[in-house]
Amino acid sequence: MITAAVGLSHSPLIGKNDPAPDVLAAVDAAVDEARAFVRAFDPELVVLYAPDHYNGFFYKEMPPFCLATEANAVGDFGSAAGPLSVDTEAARAIARDVLDHGVDLTISARMTVDHGFVQPLEVLFGGIDRVPVVPVFVNGVATPLGPVSRIRALGTAIGEAAAELDRRVLFLGSGGLSHDPPVPVLDGAPPRVADALIEGHPPTPEQRLRGEQRVIQAGRDYAAGSTAMIPINPEWDNLVLDTLAGGRLEDVDGWSVEWMGAEGGGSAHEVRTWIAAFASLAATGKYRMTSRFYRAIPEWIAGFAVATATQEATR
Ligand SMILES: O=C(O)CCC(=O)/C=C/C=C(\O)C(=O)O
Ligand SMILES: [Fe+2]
């Protein structure tokens, strides 16, 4: 089988609070390159690693990661709503294999997903129903978070399982890099917010709109420099990208949860999706990063990156 990987940052502020035209043009060019890479690779299956932002997973039960055999998008921040084209048979086969390899995978037979899953499918494929996909939720915001070594183990086990399918498989990671957007936190939350984070009451359209407007205003404040959110950290972001580009995935086992948060902010743990995707690719053979783009974009509250990689022997 042939495998490839793409890492792509997401942001709910894309198209809503855009940076200067030259920055936007640079991002568009990088995304175009990733799109061309994906088109040329022509995947028969996409294993999509993405986080959730309290739309699908809540503290009532919060797994560190979870694989879906069916998934529905909520349609937050203007992203598409409705069913993802999940390859249920492939998802079940991968899940069985991962469990056999000793990784305690949670399974969802009907996962609710948000812009974290939808954006990369829309950006790279033009919709949520264009390519067979196996969605894998990777918790990147709800503390306490487990060791990053377990995410590498998950990615490795899924890569090994995907290798058994004899198909062209793209491993896609959605999120990161350093960023500190206004995602609610359970610790110290007022009772009403805590209850919503635990129980997961679906918001009314008005509540959703208010939440989205709060995030847009936060993006404006952040870009204007008037905010308590921690700054984007290009140095740390490039360390992450260097580690992935160099194939030094074992290094991440030494990255503590606290260090990642201190360097990269409250949502830096979304890079777990990239780690899982690259660990999956590494499990199928030596790889090479074929393109890499990075820009700190305060308007999107994002250390924004796009990278592509493929097996060394295939290209
Ligand atoms: O209502 C809310 O507060 C929702 C906040 C939210 O979903 C923020 C998401 C931010 C990202 O996905 C990101 O920057 O990665
Ligand atoms: Fe996110």
Image: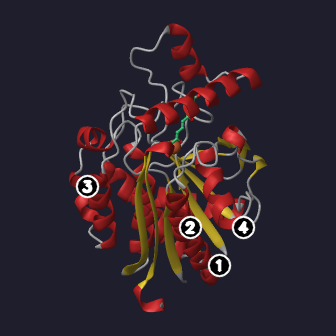
Q: Are marks 2 and 3 in contact (CB under 8 Å)?
A: no
Q: Are marks 4 and 1 in contact (CB under 8 Å)?
A: no
User: Mark 2 CB in 8 Å range of ligand 1?
Assistant: no
Q: Disc 2 marks which residue?
A: 31
Classify 147 as above or below 311: above
- Dividing the picture into quadrants, the one containing residue 200 is top right
* Mark toward the start of the polypeptide (2 vs 3): 2
**Could you tell me residue 298's position as x and y percent?**
44, 44
Instruction: Identify which residue, 78 or 194, lies in the foreground.
Output: 78
Q: Indicate the amino acid at tag 1.
A: Arg
Q: Disc 3 marks which residue?
A: 235
Q: Circle 4 sits in a helix, a strand or a loop, which is it?
A: loop
**Could you tell me residue 201's position as x and y percent?**
67, 21
Q: Indicate the amino acid at tag 3.
A: Glu
Please tell me whether mark 4 or mark 1 is closer to you in this view.
Answer: 1
Q: Indicate the amino acid at tag 2.
A: Val
Please tell me whether mark 1 or mark 2 is closer to you in this view.
Answer: 2
* Mark toward the start of the polypeptide (1 vs 3): 1
Q: Are marks 3 and 4 in contact (CB under 8 Å)?
A: no
Q: Indicate the amino acid at tag 4.
A: Val
- In this picture, residue 35 sits left or right of residue 243: right
Tell me the distance, in whole angstroms, between the alpha carbons under discs 3 and 4. 35 Å
Residue at screen point 59% across, 48% down: 14
Residue 39, label in figure: 1
